[in-house]
Amino acid sequence: MSRQEEIRAELFEHTLNGHAPEVKALTEEALLLGMDPMDILFKALIPSLEEVGRRFEKGDFFVPEMLIAARAMQGALVILRPLIAETGAKPVGRYVIGTVKGDIHDIGKNLCVIMLEGAGFEVYDLGVNTPPEKFVEAVQKHEPDIVGFSAFLTTTMPMFKANIDALSKAGLRDKVHIAVGGAPVTQEYAKHVGADSYAPDASMATRMAKQLVGDRSGPSKGAEALIIGERINPTGRKVLAAEMKEGVMDRVRSDAQAQAAAGAHMLDVNAGIPAIDEPALLVSAIRAVMEVTDLPICIDSSIIEALEAGLSAYEGKALVNSVTAEEERMERILPLVKKHGAAVIGMANDETGITMVPEERLALARRIIERAADHGIPQEDVIIDPIAMTVAADPTCGLITLETMRLIRDRLGNNMTCGASNVSFGLPDRPTVNAAFLPLAMHAGLTCAITNPLEAQVRRAILAGDLLLGHDEYAMRWIANFRADQAAKVAQ
């Protein structure tokens, strides 16, 4: 290992652990060795802070640990920022942020500033006790992608609405994304005042900001594959179906907690039981999940009324599963997606069924994306499902799906998901088949798999795929997972 590689690894670890003096010294050494400031930022510092965010969201890190890691990185940014500016490198995006008028609390806001700067944003921090006119002036002057309002007191939360009204009066409301946050703030309150998004903490605020602007943080770091946990689905699960039918949600809650603990990034919630009031049952299931985890939810139903009820009940930005390229389905579902500010999975089939020609599936995916745009839904909020089918019925199904993924990746660039377990339906030893399929799909462009995170073989296959595709800098997630598994074995 060269000294430059050692420095990247050491910067990652020292930033993660909040060792500010070591981070500063290593940054200075890296520059003396002629390392590119962008290399230092995107191959060591940003991956480390992203790992901090992941650990915080999983409950493995607490606010003080996140704060000292962010401050350690801030010391490096002080050195790197002017050097990066000299290169002419463009920021990921622009972000105006401030604590609202009447409120002088700034710890959460300051943490957001550090993490956003670390993620590559150009941040304009307006400080505390910021009146509406100052936000208006900053938006006019800096033309940010996002403006963030922070409030720590329930008595100052009404300033969110005052700020939004001031932006509307100045003709700026539709030119900027409005994000809100703070200890007493909820998703419901954010909707009430007309904000575009809500984040419960700095880590989530940074991740949402990156998603909004397209995460242009550099080509050197790939995005990890995400897992949508598939377990909360009564189809084929007689005990779960019987309990849900009786209104008993204990197993729904325990399934949600188990999948979250196993590393799921989102949870699919399905309540499709014949001869039952699916809208009411889906709402109950969604509320049960929200009681035990903050993971985002994928609302899974083919019933329009159930989707409407679920979207109305969910406190967050949901993912709708799904819409096809059928005209009637698009015209009924896409307006709901837009109304509730959700994202949607677009399945590459239409009234004629599922074509076995990859180019035709590509055309159907493009049709969904274009129709979504007609309804005001941005392309990044359309996740394409290229459709995985069982190889037990047709041995070419896997190849057709992989080729469709490559076409969508290269020609459309959308994120993709699929029911990864479908490929093995009707076969023995399904987890092994699923585990083999996932890295192939990830290489072809799959960014998010609907699968069972409780299957250790499947989960490890995704982690290994990320590692081998260069999406896991210095194998940090792979090593962390290994250590967690070892600790669990010892605990048993």
Image (spheres, helix red, strand yellow):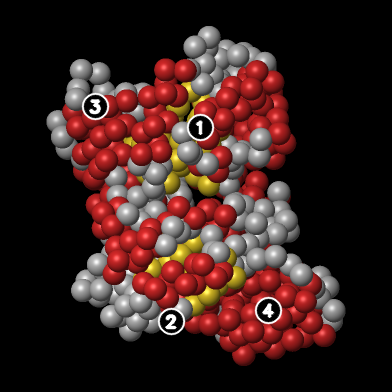
Residue tagged 2:
127
Using the rendered image of the protein, determine whether residue 421 is visible from the camera's viewpoint: no
Residue tagged 3:
278
Q: Is residue 106 left or right of residue 55?
A: left
Q: CA distance from mark 2 to mark 3?
A: 48 Å
Q: Residue at x 59, y 79 (%)?
A: 73
For marks 2 and 4, give the one nearer the viewer: 2
Q: Say whether disc 2 or disc 3 marks the residue closer to the N-terminus.
A: 2
Position of the C terminus by quadrant:
bottom left
Q: CA distance from mark 4 to mark 3?
A: 53 Å
Q: Residue at x 64, y 84 (%)?
A: 78
Q: Are marks 1 and 4 in contact (CB under 8 Å)?
A: no
Q: Say whether disc 4 or disc 3 marks the residue closer to the N-terminus.
A: 4
Q: Say whether disc 1 or disc 3 marks the residue closer to the N-terminus.
A: 3
For marks 1 and 3, give the one nearer the viewer: 1
Residue 423 versus residue 3 in the image, above or below: above
Q: Amino acid at mark 2?
A: Gly
